[in-house]
Amino acid sequence: MIRFAGLLLVFIGYTAVPILAWQGPHDNQPLAQLEQMREAELAHEAFSACSGSGSAKADPGSAPSMQKEALTYITLISRYARRQNRGTTPWWALALYDATRAGNQSQCEAIWQQVAK
């Protein structure tokens, strides 16, 4: 399944189809799959968690736990990215972690725009 951050609309002909992003730990990729991902895919997973954690603002009661779950997942993704990056954590992993911790969804998007170039 292809996942993008936020709720995006893909126009196929005249039909709009919603594609949902990370909405909690049930959307985390299995460890074996994370291990097989390239750095760009790992970056997208981290971005998805970062931006998905911001969607919890609609339900203030779930926001702290969603943020914590997203931070945990981004930390895990960072470990796999660090392995691919010769022991150095990529800048995007640190930046997405900080944006998630700050609850700054627009920062998540800005970071992803830099990574996706």
Image (tube, grey):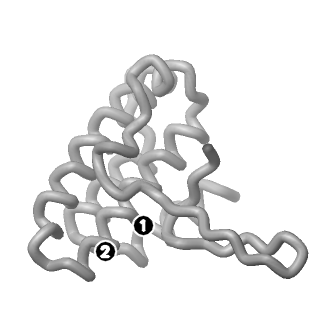
Q: Is residue 9 above or below residue 65?
A: below
Q: Which of 85/27 is in front?
A: 27
For the residues labelled 2 and 1, the Cα–Cα distance comes to 7 Å
Tell me where residue 83 sits by quadrant: top left
Give the secondary structure at mark 2.
loop
Determine the residue positioned at 79% across, 77% down: 15
Q: Which of 54/38 is in front?
A: 54
Q: Does residue 112 appear left or right of residue 24 in this picture?
A: right
Q: Quadrant of the C terminus?
A: bottom right
Determine the residue positioned at 21% across, 49% down: 69
Q: Residue 27 — which label?
A: none
Identify the residue position indicated by label 1 in the image.
Answer: 108
Give the secondary structure at mark 1.
helix
Q: Residues within 10 Å of mark 2 (few under 14, many from 20)?
A: some
Q: Does the rendering let one see residue 86?
A: no
Give the residue type that dot 1 points to.
Cys
Tell me where residue 50 sits by quadrant: bottom left
Q: Quadrant of the N terminus?
A: top right
Q: Does residue 30 appear left or right of residue 44 in this picture?
A: left
Mark 2 touches mark 1? (CB < 8 Å)? yes
Q: Is residue 104 above or below residue 99?
A: below
Residue 99, image x and y in percent? Answer: 31, 65
Q: Residue furthest right?
A: 13
Residue 108, image x and y in percent? Answer: 42, 66
Give the residue type that dot 2 points to.
Asn
Determine the residue positioned at 79% across, 74% down: 11
Residue 64, image x and y in percent? Answer: 11, 65
Q: Does the rendering let one see residue 90?
A: yes
Q: Does residue 83 appear left or right of residue 60 in this picture?
A: right
Residue 93, image x and y in percent? Answer: 39, 46
Identify the residue position indicated by label 2 in the image.
Answer: 104
Determine the residue positioned at 48% across, 59% down: 21
